[in-house]
């Protein structure tokens, strides 16, 4: 088929090949390009042959390109879209318009494009010399990951509540549940929905990732309910998170006082005393202790938590051992001794007492410390220290090595990351064994149990790392290498000591004392 013939050359197409026969020199190559613009279906594959043929004009046909179909297609690399282009001038397009939809469908069919056809675009949306999306695949919808949520433990953050003329020291301390109460749940992962590309190839959806419910099997039970796995309390008690697992600790509730009627209390779980603890009596618990009487306690023998916190709503008066492995919360401390493995929080005041903890914190607006000795590791905070009659008050902060603490923190994060990677690896092995659980022999069953035991041990390790991380973070937020902050005023006869650097307050003072290097600073 001759496409064009003039005095200089002839351009023709035969079986999809385009050739040029030049028989007279003098035709400009740029003018050839202008003529080719009239033939959108001609695609030059050898510009060198075209240039040579025009220049030499030897009267011999030379292959210069190919003759493309009227409707050409393009499939994206991901095979999710297919586009069409009509290779025609506007005038040609108008003449061929009635047959273009049929030719487009034929082009798509020959290319194997069968899915997601956009018939509206094919029938009415085609335009000359522009790509038009004619088919679009359906992407797979990957499954949702399993979602897990647990009973939300109350934040142990004491507050002062004012009701009329009375001030109440309040703390959400005990999360008590009855047997059968909800403790958590898991929504299982979904399979997802497969997709398909424009060539009809199935695109497999990924199943969502599963998550493990972490709970103490002795005190918490799990059951499938309406497609969810629900955790419920197996016993009545106090909700806690031990070794990274939700659990229910034994709870002993004393509705009245601890005294002659009850005798001394010693319990391996948590103890709540709705009344007070009489003089000379003791309460010792494996976990937490809450004494809820507004009267507080006076001249007790011992109140001790071996692994938890102590909350005494009404404060402490007089001698006796008040000791907690973690944190002590009291409304006030009067000529007593409090020892905490973590922090001591005072609602109103400490008078003539000895307080020993990592940090001693009083309520921001009303908290006072006057008289006695305060021994802290990192920080002491009070609204007032000392009093107007200049009662001798000693505040001692041992301080710490910040650089060493930062190094410990970085090392801990590395250990934490390694533990997480290891527990994920153990879980992968467990998943493999459990997928063949019905076919495991005795040796393999034993190995599976060892893997589960290793998982639990590593979980405890991660939980310990996390608790240690929180402690280090709290210390690193302290100003300098040790801090004493006075929000309102420190009175004369207040003695401040941080990392063996001492200062006696001679006049009313407010602000923050801290140590950096070998210098006691104040701001």
Image (cartoon, rainbow, N blue to C red):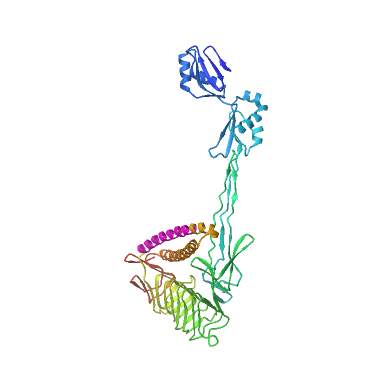
**Which quadrant is the N terminus positioned in?**
top right
Q: Residue at x 53, y 57 (%)?
A: 436
Q: Is residue 387 visible?
A: no
Q: Nearer the viewer, residue 257 or 271?
A: 271
Q: Residue 147, how many percent across, how many down?
A: 56, 58
Q: Residue at x 50, y 20 (%)?
A: 63
Q: Nearer the viewer, residue 380 or 211?
A: 211
Q: Residue furthest left?
A: 518
Q: Which residues are magenta?
A: 402-427
Query: Is 362 drawn above or below residue 297 in the view shown?
Result: above
Q: Nearer the viewer, residue 365 or 226?
A: 226
Query: Is 137 drawn above or below residue 408 in the view shown?
Result: above
Q: Residue 167, how many percent across, how many down?
A: 55, 75
Query: Is 336 drawn above or below residue 36 in the view shown?
Result: below
Q: Residue 156, how many percent across, how many down?
A: 51, 70
Q: Is residue 414 shown in magenta? A: yes
**Which quadrant is the C terminus positioned in?**
bottom left
């Amino acid at each position: 088929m001759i496409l064009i013939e003039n005095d200089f050359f002839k351009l023709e197409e035969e079986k999809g090949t385009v050739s040029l026969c030049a028989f007279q020199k003098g035709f400009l190559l740029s003018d050839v390009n202008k003529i080719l613009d009239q033939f959108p279906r001609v695609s030059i594959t050898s510009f060198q042959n075209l240039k040579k043929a025009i220049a030499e004009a030897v009267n011999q046909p030379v292959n210069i390109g190919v003759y493309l179909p009227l409707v050409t297609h393009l499939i994206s690399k991901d095979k999710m879209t297919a586009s069409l282009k009509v290779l025609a001038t506007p005038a040609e397009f108008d003449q061929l318009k009635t047959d273009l939809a049929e030719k487009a469908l034929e082009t798509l069919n020959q290319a194997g494009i069968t899915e997601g056809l956009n018939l509206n675009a094919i029938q009415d949306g085609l335009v000359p010399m522009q790509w038009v999306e004619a088919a679009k695949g359906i992407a797979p919808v990957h499954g949702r990951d399993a979602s897990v949520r647990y009973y939300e433990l109350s934040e142990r953050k004491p507050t002062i509540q004012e009701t009329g003329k009375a001030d109440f020291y309040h703390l959400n301390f005990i999360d008590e549940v009855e047997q059968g109460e909800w403790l958590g749940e898991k929504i299982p992962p979904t399979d997802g929905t497969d997709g398909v590309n424009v060539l009809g190839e199935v695109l497999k959806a990924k199943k969502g990732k599963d998550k493990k419910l972490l709970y103490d099997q002795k005190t918490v039970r799990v059951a499938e309910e309406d497609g969810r796995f629900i955790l419920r309390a197996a016993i009545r008690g106090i909700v806690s998170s031990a070794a990274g697992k939700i659990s229910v600790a034994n709870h002993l509730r004393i509705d009245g006082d601890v005294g002659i009627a009850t005798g001394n209390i010693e319990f391996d779980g948590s103890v709540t005393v709705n009344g007070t603890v009489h003089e000379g009596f003791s309460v010792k618990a494996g976990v937490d202790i809450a004494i809820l009487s507004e009267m507080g306690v006076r001249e007790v023998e011992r109140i001790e938590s071996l692994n938890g916190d102590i909350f005494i709503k009404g404060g402490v008066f007089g001698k006796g051992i008040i000791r907690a492995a973690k944190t002590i919360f009291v409304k006030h401390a009067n000529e007593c001794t409090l020892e905490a493995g973590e922090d001591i929080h005072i609602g109103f005041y400490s008078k003539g007492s000895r307080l020993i903890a990592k940090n001693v914190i009083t309520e921001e607006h009303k908290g006072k410390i006057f008289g006695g000795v305060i021994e802290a590791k990192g920080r002491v905070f009070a609204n007032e220290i000392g009093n107007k009659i200049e009662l001798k008050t000693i505040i001692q902060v041992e301080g710490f090595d910040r650089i060493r603490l930062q190094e410990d923190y970085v090392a801990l994060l590395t250990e934490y990351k390694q533990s997480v990677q290891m527990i994920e690896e153990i879980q992968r092995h467990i998943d493999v064994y459990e997928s063949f659980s019905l076919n495991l022999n005795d040796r393999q069953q034993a190995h599976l149990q060892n893997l589960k035991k290793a998982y639990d041990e590593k979980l405890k390790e991660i939980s310990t790392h996390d608790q240690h991380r929180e402690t280090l973070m709290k210390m690193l937020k302290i100003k300098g290498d040790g801090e004493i902050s006075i929000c309102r005023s420190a009175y004369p006869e207040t003695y401040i000591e941080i990392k063996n650097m001492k200062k006696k307050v001679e006049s009313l003072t407010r602000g923050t004392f801290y140590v950096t290097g070998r210098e006691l600073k104040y701001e």
